[in-house]
Amino acid sequence: MGEVVVETNYMGDLHLAQGIDHSFNNAMGRSSRSAAQVIPVTTSPGANEDGTNPGGVGGELDKQNAWLPLTESRNGSTLSVTFHLLCSGLGIQALSLPVAFATLGWAWGCICLLLAFAWQLYTIRLLVLSHESDTGTRSSRYIQLAIKAFGQKLGKLLVMFPMIYLSNGACVQLIITGGLTMELFFKTVCNDGATAYCHPMTGTECFLVFTIMAIIVAQLPNLNSITWVSLVGSITAIVYCTMIWSISIAKGRPSGISYNPPEMESDMDQFGRILNAIGIVFLAFRGHNVILEIQGTLPSNPKHPIHKRMWRGVIISYAIIAICLVPLAIAGFWVHGNKVSSSSLSAILSSASQLPGHKKTTRSILGVICILVILHCLSTFQIYGMIVYDNMESKYTTRKNRPCARWLRVTFRVLFGGLAFFAAVTFPFLVSLAPLIGGLTLPMAYAYPCFMWIALKKPKPNGLMWCINVGLGCLGLVLSVVLVVAATWNLAQRGLNANFFKP
């Protein structure tokens, strides 16, 4: 029986930063407010130095991790990681890429898409390498790694709002997207009410049905247990993306299509439109806020390092994402040219499914695409919602020092589903604010990983890796500010349809 020193503090109010490294805090000149406690841990002969079984369930020594939905099961594999990454990274926002190409044109559109893909893939690499420290401590939550790198106050300040939006806000947006798609589906099936025995559902009813389905699926206990849900979400996303770009090519390019950027009334309008298009490209990639959480489902094994298995899943998943996104952007722009003026979901889906002279076939295709989008939104809701459930349960387990009972876990998830539904009905225009809020959260994907890697790995100052990460981090912050200004300008010019309580 050996003795291991572990931390008892769990990130103050959020209770998310477990096991903050004392040596790092002392090096940064900060004194830890959490007391270290010697806890006797019985290790078997086959256990790792961190006290975990290489092939079994477990994670860090802290028993809190064994009680929380993100880390209570570490039986994941490269395959399960790939499914989670695909489901969370491939989203409906990618359907707006042809809109960006209509403004940027062929050359700059392809350059921006390639640059955004390479940049975000590099920052994912940094997060994967930062998940496990040299001492074996695992940071299985983004905010936990941020606090470890920046300190408790600065880490919370920089990451708290983006994490709330990218988890809670993402679930609200998924209810809005899934509800609107469901409404479009019923309108398509009922032929806009022309069929006597079929009446379309209202927007609020569709939101409610989607939320109930999401809450039912959310009763699965932990992130590792929803692997099959992520598999369904991955398949449906790949299928509807492939259907959209293949149908676009199949119906051919109409005459009179132009690929020149549309003329604007003023240079400022043109500049704002270009920046908005750049924002669409860079925000087409998502999921950085769940990378560490997904990696946390992998078991510790000294013979097979965690970062290698995780990176293998990243390569596979993002290769598939690239195969879906590049044809989607190119085929959509090739067919529609600069006439792609609307980025609304219903307009995109309706336009993508149209086959001239085949009205009945068009309705069938649109119905199938809508079903696939709904299933994908339901699956993605579970991944981003798991972060919220983890935070809610961590507050209880830390205060009570015991795991949540089954009935309490169900209560938490039903409560969050109800609050997310209320927010979706109250702010159905939240999707219109995505460019603005997305610009505010963009540093989590393109800037913070670079600075965190420097703080944790401490490369040689003014060395190659130091310069690359400082440069990319600063460029990411500048890009965030520019996109927020552009989104604000576009909202001021076009206005916002704030349809409160009218989904």
Image (spheres, rainbow, N blue to C red):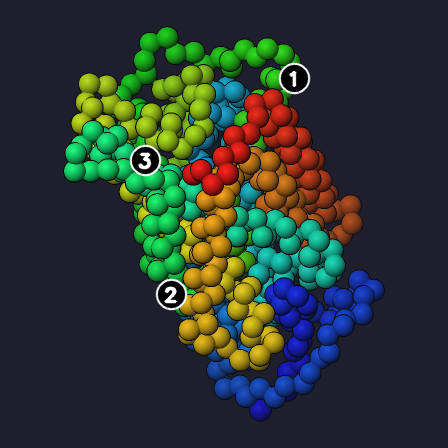
Q: Nearer the viewer, residue 10 or 183?
A: 183
- As helix, strand or loop, the secondary structure at mark 3 comes to helix
Q: Is residue 49 visible?
A: no
Q: Is residue 146 above or below residue 100?
A: below
Q: CA distance from mark 2 to mark 3?
A: 29 Å
Nearest-to-viewer mark from 2 and 3: 3
Looking at the rendered structure, the kind of residue marked 1 is Met
The residue pinned by badge 2 equals 220
Q: CA distance from mark 2 to mark 1?
A: 50 Å
Q: Position of residue 239 (x, y in %)?
A: 30, 40
Q: Position of residue 263 (x, y in %)?
A: 54, 11
Q: Is residue 235 above or below residue 63?
A: above
Q: Residue at x 50, y 86 (%)?
A: 44
Most extreme residue toward the bottom is: 1
Looking at the rendered structure, the kind of residue marked 3 is Leu
Give the quarter of the image for residue 3.
bottom right
Contact, mark 3 vs mark 1 (Cβ under 8 Å): no
Q: Residue at x 60, y 75 (%)?
A: 398
Nearest-to-viewer mark from 3 and 1: 3
Task: Tell me: 65 left or right of 375.
Answer: right
The residue pinned by badge 3 equals 184
Q: Is residue 188 above or below residue 294?
A: above
Callout 2: 10 Å neighbours few (<14), some, many (20+)? some
Q: CA distance from mark 3 to mark 1?
A: 36 Å
The residue pinned by badge 1 equals 268
Q: Position of residue 306 (x, y in %)?
A: 51, 63
The quarter in which the C terminus is drawn is top left
